[in-house]
Image: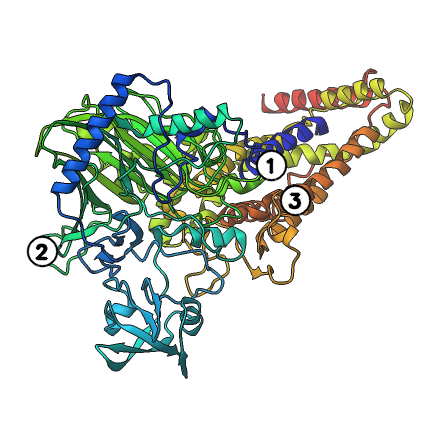
Amino acid sequence: MDRRFVLFLTLSMLVLLVNAWWSISHMPPPKPAAPAAADKDGAAAADGDPQPAAPKAADEDQPAAAAEAEDAAAADEVAAALPAEEAVPQQFVSLGSIDADSNYRMLVTFTNEGAGVRRIELANPRYLDLQDIQERIGYLGHLELKPTGGGLVVGAVGAGTPAAVAGLQVGDVITAAGFKETKAVATRDDFAEATRGKPRAEVTVEVTRSGEPQTLTMKLVRAPLDVIRPESENAALWMGSQPVAYPEPPSFLMTLSQVGTEQLDDLQEELLKKAAENGKEAPDLPAELPGVDLRTGNWRIAEQTADTVTFERRLPAAGMTIVKRYRLAEVKRPKAGDDAPADPDQPAYDLMLEVTIRNDADGEVQTAYQLDGPNGLPIEGWWYAIKVSRSGGTGLRDMIGCYFDSKAPQMIAPGKIASGDAEAFEGGSLAWAGVDAQYFSVCLIPQKTDPEQQWLDRVEGVALSPKPKARSAEGKYANVTCRLKSLPKKLAAGEEWSQEYQVFAGPKRPALLANYVPAGSKRHSLVELVYYGWFGAIANVMLAVLHFFYAIVGNYGIAIIMLTVLVRGLMFPVSRGQAKSMAKMQELKPEMDKLKEKYKGDQQKQAQMMQELYRKHGVNPLAGCLPMLIQLPVFIGLYRGLAVDIELRQAPLFGNAIRWCSNLAAPDMLLDWSSWMPSTVTKGETMLIGLGPYLNILPLVTMVLFLLQQKLFMPPAANDQAAMQQKMMKYMMVFMGLLFYKVPSGLCLYFIASSLWGIAERKLIPPATAKPALAVSSDPSRPDRSGSSRATSDRSQKRAKTKKRR
């Protein structure tokens, strides 16, 4: 075997793995954002209270100042004419249910702070929360607790949760909780500690309702997956503990970007310009116009039904009323009966969001709005996940958008948005936009009747988490969203302007995504969210075979082993040829040793004589490389499939009862060693140091089998250079074991099965017994007389047999 070629092939595979490692572990150092850029992408915009507008420059035109004064006076008159809006406390509203047998696919928790979405939980038990695989902490529901003098006031109780099943209600005051014994709870941390237990455990909760004490018993269950959650819960994963006062605004906040002649962009640019003229740092830019507090103000809940909620906010200073109406989609069950199972690919993972702006002023006014997309998507697998991205960047949550005049969606990595280097999406009429995670996405789809209709001026990427440190991996965890900025609209007195968006929030199942078609254009459906990269065709073939085997055996672990058997069975003729070639190499070893001794001072001559020896005896030193080349597409296809296909997420090797290897799309996670291993090992930002918080055994088994195969089947070294290359390959196998440490366990399972097949094939089915070693001359260039005489003898025997037949 030509060791150089083997080394080249190994290095090629190594480059692919190192590229994946680089993608997940490194981020380019963020560049300092220029003042104009900070305004453009909105990353510097704060979600705090609105700030007053900066004073006008002294040299501005008098007509412009007069016009602004008139607008201000008119606004004051409108504000005086409208009744003052009553102060509204913070409230929460829940729609839907996490009960898989209900008429809903998800449970949505809204907050009247900004009239946004705080949390979306999926009801399908196939999509459970994988953040706490080892401990599997039980779940009773997200209650939005607020401390009070006598305990904790319950702010929300979602339908289908253990808390709702036990009878807990909004407004109840929790005073104590526990398992065998209850203890008083005064803070959220107290309650979390008192109710921390395994699924199926029963916890007792003591509450006060209308002054009367009550005792409730709740049975914990496994936590459902949140496709939207408060970002502090995500940050706690890679930080190690839940941060305090971490920025986590609700999803789908909006504000007015223009009211009359006042524009938010102009206000921000003016502040940046003044700061630059005075030699000061860029200030915190206002997120809203003066007198507009739609993002942080508490909206009034105008209406609520079983599947809809309407929020309303009056802006007396602007002379406008803003309404946001949400409507949750219901599952349409077959006509056979209400108890019949619903189609899992039925498009019910969505809610409708309608934005209405009403002009309450007496005259015409021009206005525009900006609507933020989702944020707080899960970052499960934060220490091992490699998301296949169209942007070529790294990150666990990309901003994505698709336009009707483009062939493929555009994508921006979170690190680029967080560092201030991202530019707005380019295109005409928007088909959809949102945030894309590894297995789940949340997207806004404008409800247009015609693809040519253009609602928006531009779509920008906005970073909501703190700016990442230079040369750190924090950028890949950045919480980003898309910001949709509408075109301006002139409204007459009393006129309303409404635009509606469909919000998809669910798994990236192709059959499900195909149902979400913007403006009837199937070419721009949400199927484009599923992306396998350059090796999509190979990945689709591998996944089709894998799903076929799964349909037979019902276990993806066994299906991967069956796929391995199929591949190795098809490769059997090739591997047998490799075995025969290796046997011939063993026979020629004495002659090779002679040539090494004879030409030990001339490496070039030695190599030439070796090649001549191989040619003369029909030995192909490259025969051992062909099986590796054949398996390479299988490896790539399976690797891509495990990283993208939602069916393989949460697929266990032995069943849900065993926690080890309970997710073939993730490392096997045998043991949590984060409590006794150094943080440089568990949280380091490089592949060789940051191995993650778990001990994984399957990559180590894979590495041992690689080394065993190399020892058993490596042909003898033809010269000192080849011997050195073999030693290097042994070290590289160890290095590859480290690179494989965080790959999906399903991929390790494939390599383990393939290696065991190869070893068994060599040991149990040896190659055909070769003829006795030929007496080969020490100089291959000289004719082999023994071989020539043997050939002459064979020809004579054939002639004798022919004469006997005659």
Amino acid tagged 3: Leu
Q: Residues within 10 Å of mark 3 (few under 14, many from 20)?
A: few
Residue at left offset 23%, top offset 57%: 94
How much space separates mark 2 and mark 3, taking CA atoms?
57 Å
Residue 306 lies, with reference to residue 799, above or below; the image says: below
Q: Residues within 10 Å of mark 2 (few under 14, many from 20)?
A: few
Amino acid tagged 1: Arg
Report the quarter where the C terminus lies: top right
Residue 348 drawn at (x, y percent): 21, 47
Name which of mark 1 and mark 3 comes first in the sequence.
Answer: 1
Circle 3: element type = loop
Residue at left offset 53%, top offset 48%: 383
How much space separates mark 2 and mark 1, taking CA atoms?
59 Å
Amino acid tagged 2: Ala
Residue at left offset 57%, top offset 61%: 671
Foreground: disc 2 or disc 1 = 1
Q: Is residue 315 at least partly visible in the picture?
A: yes
Name which of mark 2 and mark 1 comes first in the sequence.
Answer: 2
